[in-house]
Amino acid sequence: MLTRRIALNASDLNAIMDLEARLHPQGNLLDAYKLLCQSYYGPSHMGKDLEVIQTSLEQELAKNRKLYQPLLQDIGNRKGFYRISLDLIPFFPAWGEEPIPVSSLPKKLIKQVPDDAQVARVAQMILDSCLEMEIDVRSWKATWRRLWPRIEARYKPSPELVKEVQAHVLEASIPHHSSTFKSYCQPHYRILHHKVLKQAFDIDR
């Protein structure tokens, strides 16, 4: 697991939110809040029990779902975390094999079923991407206060939505995506730290 929280500056945050706006223009403040929680804390909110992580992954993979793209979304400006589509899992190499260049992945995907070893490997990588420390509510509230002027100017949210997100801020909890986001994007992904991801994929070529 990771020993240090991700440090992001203003330039990083702008890059992360610009990319999100291009990929998912249907998102609102709730989705932006979720994105930033993931950018700072990765998959830590899912817990640190490997069996639970793997069971959750298996259950979502078994659902009748559409392909989710992009296969990779940088939510840390190349120094933090990535969202990885569940449809990337069938391409994960076996333990000990060389990382696969992302550029070699097929441009047009069809749904494939990963094998048990691939699912187990991704579950372990999710655990390895968690932070050792628990989420500090006081620290997160201070971070959100610092980020808020930039986020408010970008999203211009309704008072009702601000109130809903503020309730999550006070508990440092991470919500589900908004109903609009889920309807348009049908998200199916997990979060990996870039150093962990590089064990399986060469994301630089």
Image (spheres, rainbow, N blue to C red):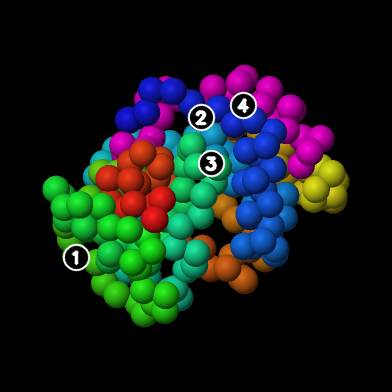
Q: Earlier in the sequence, mark 3 or mark 1?
A: 3
Q: Amino acid at mark 2?
A: Ile
Q: Which residue is mark 4?
A: 140
Q: Main secondary structure of the magenta part?
A: helix
Between marks 4 and 3 in the image, the one whose residue lies nearer the viewer: 3
**Would you say residue 52 is visible in this rendering?**
no
Q: Amino acid at mark 1?
A: Asp
Q: Does residue 130 belong to the magenta stretch?
A: yes
> In terms of image quadrants, where is residue 189?
bottom left
Q: Which residue is mark 1?
A: 115
Q: CA distance from mark 2 to mark 3?
A: 8 Å
Q: Earlier in the sequence, mark 2 or mark 4?
A: 2
Q: CA distance from mark 4 to mark 3?
A: 17 Å
Q: Which residue is mark 3?
A: 76
Q: Are marks 2 and 3 in contact (CB under 8 Å)?
A: yes
Query: Where in the figure is residue 55, as x and y percent of width and height?
Result: 28, 53
Q: Residue at x 51, y 55 (%)?
A: 73
Q: Residue at x 36, y 74 (%)?
A: 106
